Image (cartoon, rainbow, N blue to C red):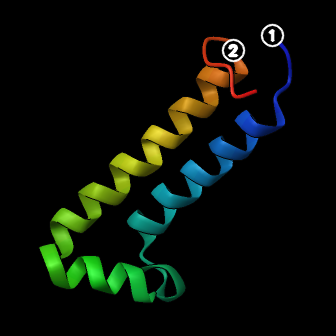
Amino acid sequence: MSFSVYGFALIIVGLFAVWGTLAKPAFFWSSRKAMGLRKLIGDGPASVVYLIIGVGVAVVGVLSMIGIVDLG
């Protein structure tokens, strides 16, 4: 198992997105892009979208760290 900077960064970004969705801090949940998505589809579905994105990015990071996905 080799250390991948890209994989590690993806894990951090994914976990940050999950944390931001669950904790809903103002700088994350009230940002312009988040507000646009929330107005378009509502708070609940927007939370689901952000959770899927966060978990997906973190999973790709983990798969990169264990060598299944090559990020270059």
Q: Amino acid at mark 2?
A: Ile
Residue 31 in the image, given as x and y percentages of width and height: 45, 87
* Front position in the image: 37 or 22: 37
Residue 61 in the image, given as x and y percentages of width and height: 62, 33
In the rendered image, which residue does mark 1 sit on?
1
Q: Amino acid at mark 1?
A: Met
In the rendered image, which residue does mark 2 sit on?
66
Identify the residue at image location x=62%, y=27%. Answer: 62
Identify the residue at image location x=48%, y=68%. Answer: 20
Name the secondary structure under disc 1: loop
Would you identify the image quadrant in which residue 33 lies? bottom left
Identify the residue at image location x=49%, y=79%. Answer: 28
Distance CA(mark 2)–CA(mark 1): 5 Å
Q: Is residue 43 above or below residue 14?
A: below
Q: Is residue 30 above or below residue 45?
A: below
Residue 22 in the image, given as x and y percentages of width and height: 39, 64
Evaluate if marks 2 and 1 touch, with contact meaning CB atoms under 8 Å apart.
yes
* Front position in the image: 27 or 35: 35
Name the N-terminal-most of marks 2 and 1: 1
